[in-house]
Amino acid sequence: MEKVSVIMPCYNDGEYITDAVASVFGQSYTNIELIVIDDGSDDPKTVSILEELEKQGNVKLLHTERLRPAGARNAGIEIATGKYILPVDADDLIEPCYIERAVQVMEEKENIGIVYCHADLFGEKSGPWELPEYSLRSMLLDNVIFVTALFRKEDWESVGGFRTNMEHGMEDYDFWLSLLELGREVEQLPETLFHYRIKPRSRTTKFQESAAVVQETYRNIYLQHPQLYEKYKDEYAIILRDALIEQLFLNRAYQESLGILERLRKNPFLKYWIKKFILK
């Protein structure tokens, strides 16, 4: 059994990390090392919990000073001794068979460089995480692979790790594109084995608040992978045109819906109910 290093950055996530750690040590795959990176936590509860985890002796605790997720993951992977790497955030959970199933794919198929699964949401929002199915076409346009996916440490070394200059996030998308540039392929396990926590406020919600920030981030990702996008430039152009057309039709449907709603609001009987239940 090849060793798997689970990399868990933590910044003031003491409220959740105990459950995350339990989900790692509850794996059916036993050759695992867990490296928790305390990235400058200043919450007393979190600091206390991390100290207790370190005393247990089965967790490697690494201290960094606000390197943020990408830098913290890199620091943990740097000292990892496993052949395979699985990042797991301190507020998320994995099912007991996830690592075993993912390693099996890696061991049987040398061309596979990324293994992930289906996922669902919990916390502030619950239900299936409706990501598009993986394809190179979809990845050229947007990220469809969450960070809690299995990959080889040697591939991480080959591409220089997670890029740390991405101020607003999306470093996992950038990293996956780098692995695709190596010629690695992707396989998605057909089961829901990862649970992603939705918080009221997170780096993702902040990222989604500004169109300018989103545009800048995706522009930088494009510029950071010139060979990949040059190789698939014709297909990428078609993908962008298809996406634009889809958005035009969605906008048209939205505008038509608003028109219908406005006409309904003029009906005295319906006006009260629309105001109460739709436009509240």
Image (spheres, helix red, strand yellow):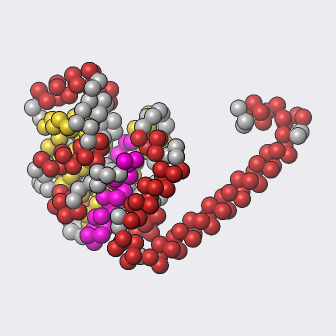
Q: Residue at x 56, y 65 (%)?
A: 243
Q: Nearer the viewer, residue 193 or 57?
A: 57
189 relative to 272, above or below:
below
150 relative to 200, above or below:
below
- Quadrant in which residue 69 is drawn: top left
- How many numbered marks, from 0 up? 0
Q: Nearer the viewer, residue 33 or 140?
A: 140
Is residue 155 in view?
no
Q: Nearer the viewer, residue 77 or 198?
A: 77
Q: Residue at x 35, y 51 (%)?
A: 166
187 relative to 67, above or below:
below
- Quadrant in which residue 1 is drawn: bottom left
Q: Residue at x 75, y 30 (%)?
A: 276
Which x, y percent locates residue 91?
A: 33, 36
Which x, y percent locates residue 132?
A: 47, 58
Which x, y percent locates residue 101?
A: 26, 54
In the image, residue 176 lies in the stretch drawn in magenta:
yes
Q: Residue at x 31, y 67 (%)?
A: 180
119 relative to 132, above or below:
above
Pick the quarter of the image with the C terminus: top right
Is 263 on the left or on the right of 275, as rendered? right
Q: Which residues are magenta?
A: 167-196
Is residue 15 in view?
yes
- Quadrant in which residue 11 is drawn: top left
Which x, y percent locates residue 88?
A: 28, 44
Q: Nearer the viewer, residue 106 or 260?
A: 260
In the image, residue 258 lies in the stretch drawn in magenta:
no
